[in-house]
Amino acid sequence: MAGNGNEAILKINNIEVRYHEVILVLKGVSIEVPAGGIVALLGANGAGKSTTLKAISGLLKHEDGEVTDGGIEFLGERIHRLEAEQIAKRGIFQIIEGRRVFEHLTVEENLVVGAHLRPSGLKERLDMVYHYFPRLRERRNVMAGFISGGEQQMCVIGRAMMAQPKLMLLDEPSMGLAPLLIKEIFEIIQRLNREEKIPILLVEQNVKLALTVAPHAYVMENGRIVMDDSSEKLKENPDIRDFYLGLTDVGGRKSFREVKHYKRRKRWLA
């Protein structure tokens, strides 16, 4: 359990998720996100990370998926049977993988769209977003389809901020970005958590980065949580070091053959 001393704002309790009423994707997943905390969800492609976020935000129904067992609680209320819009009204916002801006709208128009559920105080919230992302202020009148990938990522995070989120779900925010932009965006994510007290559940394939940003992390394999602990302990775990960080005990990067062998044996699944 995510243990930083704060009560959990989100509790995922032993959920199962099926697609098309047949395909079992998540198998007894339990995760907690503490109030004011950042929690990382780690795992290889296809492990079930994005499905977990969609189960929380109510987006499964758009893909003929559903939570068929267990439950999801947000601020003490069971939400897994609610529609996506009802969940958003309660303050949960997912930043979907792939930087999905409205390309035909300007940057500022994209941000304003994020405030449609809470339209009051629009100018103050725009100023807040521009405070964290000054580059968006400079580009506010440019069509979002013509800005860089890093600026688009800033735009979709800023759009979620406009909705005054009580919980932010971030799906692969570093994907496809240059290292300097990744560093800049993750510094801002940490500031948002620290200064605005926004809890964050982070799905991120850059495990080293995720373990630096999030104090607690869960590791998912084949639709199950196979490990969870503080990030400091996970960094020292030989399984995490070998497979996810790609390091041997002496710090050298493992060969592809060694990683394939490790993937077959998966000590924690034995």
Image: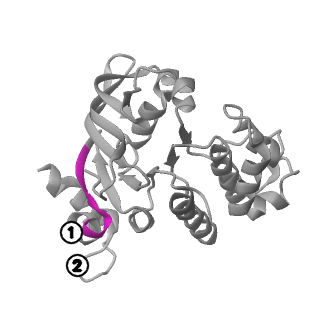
**Could you tell me which residue is drawn at 60 percent across and 46 percent down?**
98
Depth check, front residue: 219 or 243:
219
Mainly helix, strand or loop, the magenta region? strand
**Could you tell me which residue is drawn at 76 percent across and 64 percent down?**
134
Q: Position of residue 159 (x, y in %)?
A: 68, 45
The quadrant in which residue 81 appears is top left
Q: Determine the CA span between mark 2 and mark 1.
A: 7 Å
Query: Of label 2 and label 1, which has the lower sequence position?
Result: 1
C-beta proximity under 8 Å, tags 2 and 1: yes
Q: Position of residue 237 (x, y in %)?
A: 22, 67
Q: Is residue 231 magenta?
A: yes
Counting the numbered discs, the total is 2
Q: Which residue is mark 2?
A: 249
Q: Is residue 177 left or right of residue 270?
A: right
- The label shown at residue 126 is none
- The label shown at residue 238 is 1
Range drawn in magenta: 225-233
Q: Is residue 177 above or below residue 54?
A: below
Find numbered disc 2 in the image and state the secondary structure of the residue it sits on.
loop
The quadrant in which residue 38 appears is bottom left
